[in-house]
Amino acid sequence: MAHIIELPTRSDSRGSLTVLEKVLPFEMKRLYWIYDLNDEARGKHRHKQTWQALICLQGKCEVVVKKHQHEEIFILEKPNEVLLLEPDDWHEMRHFQGQPILLVAASHFYDANDYIKEPL
Ligand code: TYD
């Protein structure tokens, strides 16, 4: 099931630096980011093969995750937290605040045939 992983961060008088290495259970093949968001929810699908890792670099959003009639809501608002989504974790991103920038690392190249709209 989806879960949040806290990433190591080095903070000093100059600011903070967060590292994403050796924590994802997949090799990253694709990186994309979502921004300029409005009131419309995004996502609302799961994948056949693709693992994804979401980081909210700026702002705040909710990620609803559904699988086997179980629903969990994750709040993403810290740039040192990554939400790991398994392929069959149906997810919806919503309730955007503070001009979010959502960075997504994916295990596979983009393929429209890898999408499934209904939760498992
Ligand atoms: P979509 O999957 O609907 O975004 P979200 O899951 O955030 O709701 O993708 C929006 C558009 O971008 C759609 O036309 C497919 C395209 N797209 C790519 O070309 N490459 C990608 O890596 C992704 C994620 C989407």
Image (tube, helix red, strand yellow):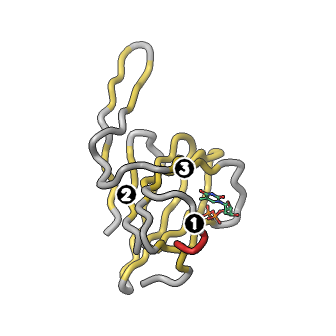
What is the quadrant of residue 83 in the picture? bottom left
Q: How far apart, in angstroms, are the residues tagged by discs 3 and 1?
A: 27 Å
Q: Which mark, by number, is residue 50?
A: none
Instruction: Evaluate if marks 3 and 2 touch, with contact meaning CB atoms under 8 Å apart.
Output: no
User: Percent from the top left, x then y, of residue 117?
Assistant: 56, 80
Q: How far apart, in angstroms, are the residues tagged by discs 1 and 2?
A: 19 Å
Q: Which label sits in the foreground, 3 or 1?
A: 1
Taking the spot 43% from the left edge, 77% from the top edge, the residue there is 66
First of labels 1, 2 by sequence position: 2
What residue is disc 1 on?
Answer: 111
What residue is disc 3 on?
Answer: 60
Q: Which label sits in the foreground, 1 or 2?
A: 1
Q: Residues within 10 Å of mark 2 (few under 14, many from 20)?
A: many
Q: Residues within 10 Å of mark 1 (few under 14, many from 20)?
A: few
Q: Which of 1 and 31 lies nearest the eye of the viewer?
A: 31
What residue is disc 2 on?
Answer: 84
Compared with 12, 17 (above or below) is below
Instruction: Evaluate if marks 1 and 2 touch, with contact meaning CB atoms under 8 Å apart.
Output: no
Which residue type carries mark 1? Answer: Asp
User: Percent from the top left, x then y, of residue 44?
Assistant: 57, 73
Question: Residue at the top extreme?
Answer: 13
What is the quadrant of residue 115 in the picture? bottom right
User: Percent from the top left, x then y, of residue 95?
Assistant: 60, 61
First of labels 3, 2 by sequence position: 3
Helix, strand or loop status at disc 1: loop
Q: Which of 105 and 79 lies nearest the eye of the viewer?
A: 105
